[in-house]
Amino acid sequence: MTETKHELPLKHIPMDKLPSKGLPYPQDAKIEYRTYTFGETKMESASSGSAVRAVKRALNCIKTTGMSRDKITILDLFYLGVLIKMSSEGASEFTMPYICWNCGDENEHKFSQGDLDFKDIDPSVESLPMKVEMKDGKILEFSPMTAKQYIDLYSGKFNECFPKKKPDGVAPVATLVKNLPFKQAYDYLTGVTDAEDRELINEIDKMLMHEIKPLTFKCANTLDDDSVCNADLSLKLEGREALLKPFRGRESSVKSRIFYGNAPEHKPNRTRPTRVPTGGGTEQATS
Ligand SMILES: [Zn+2]
């Protein structure tokens, strides 16, 4: 049986189930996604992969009606990428390997789609774009970074705009400005000196932020004295890493997972337990 990508079944995601709540999109727009094809998952695991390519690959699985696919925000796409991966793995429960900051040992945390929670766009934002007047009278219109802008920014399209020829801290904020060409927005923001203006821009950046909250749980590892570690852990699911790597499978290095707890101020001086070999892994050195 051969099947083209376009014939793969699509799942509809209601706007209010997205981290952005659909605020950046037209009211009648519709977003659907399909799973990765076997070829797509194999292609990715056979290569080291780049974030831009992972974003493009996730975007390829999305069908939009009533709006361009390019308008999807990058933060919604990170979430959709997680859903696409979940549906591609065809299970209702998923496993995320971690290394505990406290006991230093590996374990796995199980979660399901229902465990995912969002930090939404600030509830005070009623519609987009947000229009603000700067101290010099300039009107700027802000809306979240789109997947297309992310691809352009991190594939080097705007590198000539930056003094260091690669995106800096101002660059992602400049993508939020929708009523100026990128270079003008970048140059304008770079030159802002007024303290209140700077604070305003930071505030808008925060208000537009929307993402999956990290999964928080306690380490279930048993220590040498048979007690349970219980350290607070927070596992970040979204972002480039989550798009790039499958949840399951030791073939992606467990070390590359993001694992951090609440400010490990003191490293425990405990003798490390013998490490259980991960077994048959083809772990890649990623650093
Ligand atoms: Zn632990």
Image (cartoon, grey):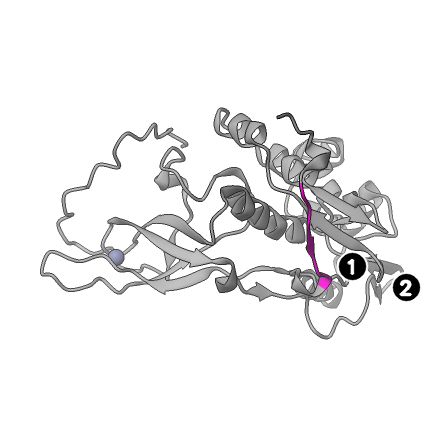
Residue 132 x %, y % = 84, 66
Q: Looking at the picture, tell me which residue is in the foreground, 240 or 154.
A: 240
Q: Is residue 230 left or right of residue 195?
A: left
Q: Is residue 114 above or below residue 42?
A: below
* Amino acid type, mark 1: Pro
Q: Secondary structure at mark 2?
A: loop
- Decide if residue 133 is in sight here: no
Residue 9 x %, y % = 67, 43
* Amino acid type, mark 2: Gly
Q: Secondary structure at mark 1?
A: loop
- Decide if residue 231 is in sight here: yes
Mark 1 is surrounded, within 10 Å at the Cα level, by few (under 14), some (14 to 19) or many (20 or more) other residues, namely some
Residue at the disc numbered 2: 137
Residue 271 x %, y % = 12, 49
Can you tell me which quadrant of the image ligand 1 is in? bottom left
Query: Which image quarter: residue 133?
Result: bottom right
Mark 2 is surrounded, within 10 Å at the Cα level, by few (under 14), some (14 to 19) or many (20 or more) other residues, namely few
Residue at the disc numbered 1: 24
